[in-house]
Image (cartoon, helix red, strand yellow):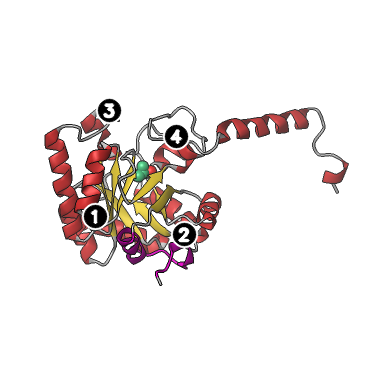
C-alpha cells in the first residue's frame, strides 16, 4: 500500500522524492511569520519557503536585494516556531553565497543553526556550483532556483519570461542537470516557457517546482501575499488569486475606524 502524503507526519526531502516518483504534485507557498505559517501548515502544505520575497511583501523594497541574512533568519525562526508538518526551506539572501563558497557555507550554517530550518535555497546554476557543493557537503539540503532569478534583476533588467531563446534554454537544462548531479533535492523554475519546464521535469529525477512554468512540472509555488490578494498591484499571467484580502481587510479597517469615531466600539458588552 502506498502512503499518501496526507498521512505523512513530517514532510522530508525523501517524501518529496517519493511524491515525484508516484506523480503526486507538491504544494509550496511562501511564509514569513508565525501566524500565517501556522495557517498554511495546518492546511496541509508540503513546503513553506521563507522566501527573500519578504524583502518585497514584508519590508516594501522594490527588489529582493536589500534583505539581510539576519532578517532572513528572523523570518525563518518565526515560521519554524509555527510549523509541525511542512518542510521549511529558507532563501539564502543576495550577497550571502555568491562570491565565496566558504562564506556561503557559513551563511547556510547560520540559517540552519539559528532558525532550525530544514533546507536552504539558492539562485543560479554553474556559477554557484562551488558554493552549492560546499553546503551540500556539510549535510545541508539545497533547493536550486533557475529561470527568472530575482536576485539578478539588475543583470536581466526586467522581470520578463526567461529562456525563450535556444541558447538560454540549453543553458538552463545544463544547469538543472548540474544541480541534480551535485545533490540538490529539488529545483524551482521561475517564469519560463511551460514546454521547457516540462522537459526539465522529465529529464531530471529530482522534483521541479514551478512558478509561472506551467503544469508539466512536479509542483507549484506562489507568494502567499499574491495568492491571497493582499498585494493588488502585481498581476502576472501565472498568478491565480484565491482571495481578494486587500479589499476585505481594507473594509474591516474602515469599519473599525468608523466604529471608533462614532463611539460604536466598544459597546456595553465589550467593556469591564
Ligand atoms: O522568494 C520567493 O518568494 C521565491 C519564490 C518566488 C519561488 O523565491
Ligand 1 quarter of the rendering: top left
Other-residue count near label 2 (Cα within 10 Å), few / some / many at <14 / 14–19 / ≥20:
many
Q: Residue 80 has which mark?
A: 2
User: Closer to the N terminus: mark 1 or mark 4?
Assistant: 4
The CB of the residue at mark 3 lies under 8 Å from ligand 1? no
Instruction: Give the residue number, with chain letter if any, for mark 4.
Output: 60
Badge 3 or badge 1: first in the primary sequence: 1
Q: Is mark 4 within 8 Å of ligand 1?
A: no
Q: Inspect the magenta stretch and tell me whether residue 29 lies in it.
A: no
Residue 100 in view here = no
Which mark sits nearer the N-terminus, 3 or 4?
A: 4
User: In this orientation, which residue lies closer to the viewer: 49 or 213?
Assistant: 213
Q: Secondary structure at mark 3?
A: loop
Q: Which secondary structure, mark 2?
A: helix
CA–CA distance between discs 3 and 1? 27 Å
Foreground label between 4 and 2 = 2
Answer with left or right where residue 120 lies relative to residue 10.
left
Q: Secondary structure at mark 1?
A: helix
Mark 4 crowd level (few <14, some 14–19, many ≥20, 10 Å Cα): few
Identify residue for label 3: 158
Q: Can you see residue 141?
A: yes
The residue located at (42%, 35%) in the rendering is 239
Q: In the image, residue 214 lies at what x, y percent?
A: 32, 40
The segment highlighted magenta reads 2-22
For label 1, the residue is 104
Label 2 vs 1, first from the N-terminus:
2
User: Pointers 4 and 2 in contact (CB under 8 A)?
Assistant: no
Q: Is residue 271 above or below residue 154?
A: below
Amino acid at each position: 500500500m502506498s502512503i499518501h502524503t496526507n498521512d505523512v507526519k513530517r514532510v522530508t526531502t525523501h517524501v518529496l522524492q517519493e511524491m515525484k516518483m508516484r506523480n503526486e504534485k507538491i504544494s509550496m507557498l511562501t511564509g514569513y511569520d508565525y501566524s500565517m505559517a501556522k495557517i498554511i501548515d495546518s492546511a496541509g502544505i508540503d513546503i513553506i519557503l521563507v522566501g527573500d520575497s519578504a524583502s518585497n511583501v514584508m519590508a516594501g523594497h522594490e527588489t529582493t536585494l536589500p534583505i539581510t541574512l539576519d532578517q532572513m533568519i528572523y523570518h525563518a525562526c518565526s515560521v519554524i516556531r509555527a510549523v509541525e508538518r511542512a518542510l521549511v526551506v529558507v532563501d539564502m539572501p543576495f550577497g550571502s553565497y555568491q562570491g565565496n563558497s566558504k562564506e556561503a557555507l557559513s551563511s547556510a550554517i547560520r540559517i540552519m543553526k539559528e532558525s532550525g530550518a530544514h533546507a536552504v535555497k539558492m539562485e543560479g546554476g554553474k556559477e554557484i556550483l562551488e558554493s552549492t557543493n560546499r553546503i551540500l557537503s556539510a549535510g545541508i539540503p539545497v533547493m536550486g532556483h533557475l529561470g527568472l532569478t530575482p536576485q539578478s534583476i539588475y543583470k536581466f533588467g526586467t522581470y520578463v519570461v526567461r529562456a525563450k531563446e535556444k541558447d538560454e534554454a540549453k543553458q538552463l537544462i545544463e544547469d538543472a542537470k548540474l544541480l541534480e548531479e551535485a545533490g540538490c533535492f529539488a529545483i524551482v523554475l521561475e517564469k519560463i516557457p511551460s514546454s521547457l519546464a516540462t522537459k526539465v521535469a522529465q529529464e531530471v529525477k529530482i522534483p521541479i517546482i514551478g512558478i509561472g512554468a506551467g503544469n508539466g512540472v512536479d509542483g507549484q509555488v506562489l507568494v502567499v501575499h499574491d495568492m491571497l490578494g493582499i498585494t493588488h498591484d502585481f498581476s502576472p499571467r501565472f498568478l491565480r488569486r484565491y482571495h481578494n484580502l486587500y479589499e476585505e481587510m481594507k473594509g474591516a479597517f474602515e469599519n473599525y475606524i468608523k466604529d471608533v469615531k462614532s463611539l460604536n466600539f466598544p459597546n456595553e458588552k465589550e467593556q469591564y
